[in-house]
Every structure is written in C-alpha cells, then in structure tokens.
C-alpha cells in the first residue's frame, strides 16, 4: 500500500470515529430572549467554528406581514414599518428561534412556533380550514414500516396533519431501497426511522416525532398504540404477516382505525375498528380460525404465503405483480415496489387519513386507485 492509500485509509478510520451519533433526529432550539439559551448558543459557536448559519428571518417576517394584511397591496416601506412595529424593539437576531441541526451542522433562524405554523400552513387555506388545521394538530398517528410509510409520513408532515407521529421500522437504508425511498446516498446505513424523522424535522422542527428504531413486536405493540395517548389512526405498511394480524387485533381491542396501502393497483384498506369493535379483520377475507392457527405458529411458509394472497386478494392484483410473485426465489428475492406507486400511495393514504381525522369518512372500505389501468383503458378506446 503506497503512502497516499495509507493516509486515505487512516482518514476513513478517523472520520468513522468522530461521526456524530447516528440516532440523533431532534434539533436543538435556542430562544435568544432567554439568557441561558444565549450562553448555550455562544458555547456551540465557540466549539464549532464551522457551523453553517442560515438567517432568512427578515424575509419570513415580510411573509408574515403580507399574510396578516391579505387585502392590502403593501409597498416595501409599509412592510418594513409593520415589521418594526411587530418586533416592538426586540432586535431581529433575538426574535424567533435558532434551530441547530447537529447531523448537518446547520443553524437556521425561523419564526417561533405559532407564527411559523401560520406562515407554513397558509397555502393550505381553504382546502384545509384553520379550524380543521387546529383539529389535526391534536391528532396522533402511528406508522409501522417506512417504505410506503415514509411517503405517508412526509406528506402528512408537509400538510401538518398531526400533532404527534410515531414511526417504527427495524431496518437500515440499503441501496436497494433507493428505487422507492426519497433520500440520499449519504444516508446509507442509517436507520429508516432516523432518516424519516430528520426530514420531517428539517421541514418543521415543531412537529413531534417519536421513533421506534427496533420496529414493532408483540412485546411493544401496546406501547406503540397507547403510550403518550392512544393513536387516532394506525398506518400498517409492514411486511410481517404476524405484526399485521396482531396490530389489527390490538387496534380492534383499543378501537383504533387501521389503514393500509399495498403499492399494487393503488389498493387502499380502511378498517374502522373505532366505529365497530366487532369488525372482522381484513374485511373478513381470512377466517378467524385460520388466524388463530397462524398465531399458534402452526402454519408452514407456504400456508403463510397463501394467507398473504388472501389479504391482498390474489385474483385482483396486477398481472405484473403475479409475474413477480412467480419469480421470488428464482430471479428476484422479494416482491417489487415502484417509486411512482409508493409516492402516489403515500399521497392517497395521507388524504384519506386527513378525512378520517376530520370525521369526513365514517365507514370501512377497500378501494383501488389504479392510474395505470385507468390510462390504459382510455388508450384502448382511442
């Protein structure tokens, strides 16, 4: 090994030793009207001279003034006068919140929570009213599985459709995930929970996110559903048939609605256990006796696969998916998911969750949102 390669190898080991805690996803907030926060931020800047500072607060204040006077055609001078009046002698550097993202080494200056929410959700009006936005801010949503689940989580975060989000996945990011997960190569090896939580916090640091880095098991399922207050909606996007069954049985016990998107033909399931605690799981597609046999561990892998086929209703899955299932263990290792299906499914599911939380949907259903079928059918007509 030549000298350059030795130095490069040493540098890699050094970087690996000094990299920050890879499980960190909470930014640090500083309000500089408080002396303790002033001292803490000064210490950070003295310790980390390479911090990247982004201060666009003045522009945010301009946006805020325009939103507070929507019927007026404000001139630049009028906006500046309104900002001065709004600050009420507080220096601009002290106003709002400084948010430090340790995983990026960025320090960002933003409006404090109420004003930040007002500006960030303004373009939701009146597709989501202020009253509805307030209702959504009190809701708790749990997501198990972060493939489609990541798309759901980010869409919900952008719309600010929750007050607390619990996300669970035991897996780390691999290159094969990048055909459907929107993230960076620089995140390879990171937990999927951490990746999703960081992106949400970079969109809105005031949103509450709780991570279950080891995924969901029968031991922590009750904790996930109930700790800190019962979930208002459970999103099932996990691969484990056992957890799918247990999650529904527990959700039925605790009267929590369950929603699921399968990324094939845009299939969405809504099971309103909150409205009917006698509702059969999976819309009754699987006999309760078969479910009990499964929970006792009396089923072979082939029988478990048959169970999955009943859950997704094999006769109605796409021809491409049937072709793929026949190739598992031969030319592919697992069933495929396309980014277009995952992103569309996440958006559809986020809309449905919002409608459930606002009391607009009051029934269980299974529905297909199959854009490919719709377009291909029309193409045949022409």
Image: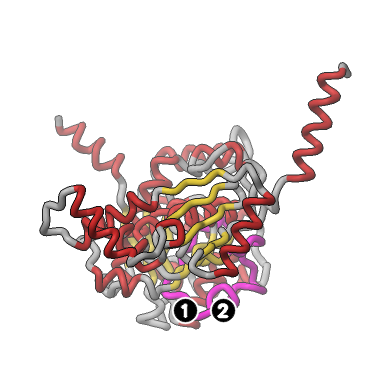
Q: Mark 1 points at which residue?
A: 252
Crowd band around label 1 with a 10 angstrom C-alpha radius: few (<14), some (14–19), many (20+): many
Camera-side mark, 1 or 2: 2
64 left or right of 98?
Answer: left
Q: Is residue 334 magenta?
A: no
Q: Depth check: 289 or 283 in front?
A: 283
Q: Residue 183 carries which label?
A: none
The picture places residue 92, in percent across and down from the top left corner, at 40, 57
- Residue 333, by quadrant, is top right
Q: Which residue is drawn at 23% across and 60% down?
A: 82
Give the structural element (helix, strand or loop) at label 2: loop
Toward which corner of the image does residue 374 lie, by quadrant? top left
> Is residue 228 one of those drawn in magenta?
yes
What residue does disc 2 label?
227
Other residues around mark 2 within 10 Å, as few (<14) / some (14–19) / many (≥20): few
Q: What stretch is highlighted in magenta?
A: 211-239
Outermost residue on the top side: it is: 2
Q: Can residue 358 be seen in this view?
A: yes
Mark 1 and mark 2: Cα distance apart in space: 17 Å
Q: In this view, does 223 lie to the left or right of 155?
A: right
Give the image location of residue 227, x and y in percent: 56, 78
Q: Is residue 304 visible?
A: no
Q: Residue at x 48, y 82 (%)?
A: 254
């Amino acid at each position: 090994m030549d000298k350059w390669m030795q130095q490069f190898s040493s540098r890699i080991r050094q970087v690996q030793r000094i990299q920050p805690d890879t499980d960190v996803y909470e930014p640090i907030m500083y309000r500089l009207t408080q002396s303790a926060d002033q001292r803490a931020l000064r210490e950070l800047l003295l310790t980390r001279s390479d911090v990247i500072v982004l201060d666009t607060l003045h522009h945010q204040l301009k946006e805020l003034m325009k939103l507070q006077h929507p019927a007026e055609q404000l001139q630049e001078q009028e906006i500046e006068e309104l900002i001065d009046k709004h600050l009420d002698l507080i220096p601009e550097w002290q106003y709002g919140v400084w948010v430090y993202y340790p995983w990026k080494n960025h320090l960002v200056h933003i409006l404090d929570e109420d004003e930040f929410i007002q500006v960030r959700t303004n373009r939701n009006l009146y597709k989501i009213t202020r009253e509805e936005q307030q209702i959504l801010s009190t809701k708790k949503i749990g997501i198990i599985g972060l493939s489609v689940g990541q798309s759901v989580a980010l869409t919900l975060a952008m719309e600010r459709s929750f007050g607390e989000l619990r996300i669970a996945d035991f897996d780390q990011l691999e290159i094969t995930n990048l055909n459907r997960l929107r993230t960076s190569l620089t995140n390879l090896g990171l937990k999927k929970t951490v990746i999703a939580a960081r992106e949400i916090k970079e969109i809105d640091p005031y949103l509450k996110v709780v991570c279950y880095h080891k995924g969901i098991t029968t031991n922590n399922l009750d904790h996930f559903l109930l700790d800190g207050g019962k979930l208002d909606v459970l999103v099932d996007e996990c691969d484990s048939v056992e957890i799918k069954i247990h999650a529904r049985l527990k959700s039925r016990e605790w009267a929590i609605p369950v929603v699921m998107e399968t990324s094939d033909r845009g299939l969405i399931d809504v099971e309103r256990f909150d409205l009917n605690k006698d509702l059969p799981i999976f819309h009754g597609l699987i006999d309760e006796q078969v479910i009990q046999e499964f929970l006792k561990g009396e089923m072979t892998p082939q029988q478990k696969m048959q169970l999955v086929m009943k859950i997704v209703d094999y006769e109605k899955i796409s021809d491409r998916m049937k072709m793929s299932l026949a190739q598992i263990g031969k030319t592919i290792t697992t069933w495929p998911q396309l980014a277009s299906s995952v992103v569309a499914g996440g958006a559809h599911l986020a809309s449905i969750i919002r409608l459930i939380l606002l009391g607009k949907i009051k029934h269980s259903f299974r529905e297909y949102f199959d854009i490919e079928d719709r377009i291909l059918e029309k193409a045949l007509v022409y």
